[in-house]
Amino acid sequence: MSTKTTFKRIALVAVAAMGLGVLTSVAPASAAPNATPWTVTAAQTSTGGGTATTTATQIVGANNYVELQANDDYLTLGAVTVLVVSGSTITYTETGVGSIAGIVNTTATEVLYTGLTAELIKLNKVRISAATVGTVTAKYYERTVVAGVPTDTLKQTVTITVSAVKTWSSRFSTSVILGAGAGVAGVGETDILAPKGALTGPFMGVATVTVTFNDAANALLASPTGTFPSVRAVFRNASDPGNLSWGANGGGNVGRDVTVITKAATQTLTIFQDGWNGTSTIDIYVDGTYWTYETLSFYGDVTTVTPTQKLFVAPIAPVLGAAHGCGQVSAVCLGTTIALTPAVTLVATDAKGIKVPFLAFTATSSDTTVFASSTTYAETVATGTGSYNANVSSIPAGTSGKTATITWKTLKSDGVTVVDTAATPTTFAVGGSAASIAFTVNASGQAGAKGTFTIDKKDSAGNKSVDAAHTVNFKSNTVVTASIFDASSNTQTSGTSTQLIINGTKTWDFFNPLVDASVVFDVLVDSLLTGSQSFTVSTVSQAALDAAAEATDAANAATDAANAAAEAADAATAAAQDAADAVAALATQVATYISNLRKQITSLTNLIIKIQKKVKA
């Protein structure tokens, strides 16, 4: 027992002996009385209990609270102390065995510990309401009174943060689909391929969707600090195949539109096959509002195999023959070298165009003296995407230029019906190493215009040489931008790079210089084979030249037309003068005729008069 507590007990005995009856019980001894006795015993979180600075958090709620408990008696014998609350109110107090009861003020914002044994507060409890969002403080003071004036000295501060009930965050919550089960391919959000199953069942679960609800702090929702939302899953289209179930949380119900019954922070949706093939989209609604979606495809029996040829000319094989191309999984067949490039990529689909994974292929050669059938193979892509890589094998000691068509085939689920690539032939040739090249340039001659240059390569027999990687040095006497250069620095005058030249040819793009220039391109292939081409670039466009020529022609035509018009005017003037002269001559002639006529009339009149006179006589 501490010395302080011993003195406390003596004082109590003395008071009792005097018959004052102040106390009826003796408080247990405190192991370590101190000035910061309060710790948090009920809250969402707390730190620093029993220290000068203590913190706590709580979720708002009408009946929620933070509970403080004094784990020790106060340090000073008989000292009056007070716990002052701001931002909230005190809802409950409890007195520890052998400790003194606190006195709560009328506004329920203070608890006062006073009396001869005021320091005895161990195991006393105070509950502070968390009914309102905000910051609440509980400050513990030692109070002294001098001449009737109280002075409070702060000993401990408890800061309480009351937060709203946490809800799910559409930003931080997640929905993840995962394929599962026999014959299910793909593992990501967009590549799941599941077998459709038989129409008569049983129907297997082929994928799960895990929905995880996190709050705005990206923390998993938990009770009672957070509220769990309702979640619904429904197929977007009536024709989408499959069925859905939330499992036990959905009451075990299976259907095409399902909603959870038991809410939780994490929900798992199972997607079942239903015997139909096609692509399905599952829309997910949270608390009645659309949130996200997941997709997967159900595949049926293979109906089509479509080849895409990527290599064309295989090497003349040595004694043991030679595989050409990559027939392994896609993680290996990266296309960076000839050996890592599939000779053919096969895509298998069902009647609705859904890819079909996990098939076995065989290959048949149209001429087994050129390419083998038995040594040509395909291997399923590891993730089962319905795409397959294949290589080809040439026969030893083959002849340059010889060709054969390779047909790949697989079987339907009945094990009998063949599906092959016969409708889309893939023909391969055998060739030797490059012995010569032809270098051609297609350029418009206009500054800045796009052009192309091409390397064609032949073997010593004059046939397309084998698909191979070549070291190509390209050089220009002026700066050009060309695709043969590295993408990080594609405008320069020269560069050396490794180029895959397939099927005997490869073409690159370039852009003419922006100034007038006489351009010379040179190529050197494998330090042995050379080619050179030149052309002229002009800043005056051909369109401008054509327009100028057309303008000149138009001016000449206008001049000719003006000359013709002048000549026509002169002819018209001459004709007009001739007409005027003719009119003048005619007028003179008419005047003469009229004068003569008048004379004749006068003579006739005189004759008539004479005759009249004679008749009267």
Image (tube, rainbow, N blue to C red):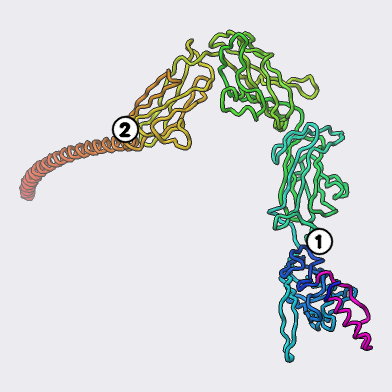
Q: Which residue is mark 2?
A: 517
**Residue 156 in view of the camera:** yes
Q: Amino acid at mark 1?
A: Pro
- Along the line of sight, the residue nearer the viewer: 79 or 414: 79
Residue 314 lies in the magenta stretch? no
Q: Amino acid at mark 2?
A: Ala
Q: Position of residue 239 (x, y in %)?
A: 76, 41
The answer to whether 148 appears left or right of 503 in the picture is: right
Residue 9 lies in the magenta stretch? yes
Q: Position of residue 74 (x, y in %)?
A: 80, 75
Query: Which mark sits nearer the N-terminus, 1 or 2?
Result: 1
Q: Which residue is mark 1?
A: 224
Residue reaching furthest to the bottom: 147
- Along the line of sight, the residue nearer the viewer: 424 or 575: 424
Query: Residue 474 appears in which quarter of the rendering?
Result: top left
Query: Residue 12 appears in which quarter of the rendering?
Result: bottom right
Q: Position of residue 116 (x, y in %)?
A: 84, 83
Residue drawn at x 85%, y 49% is: 250
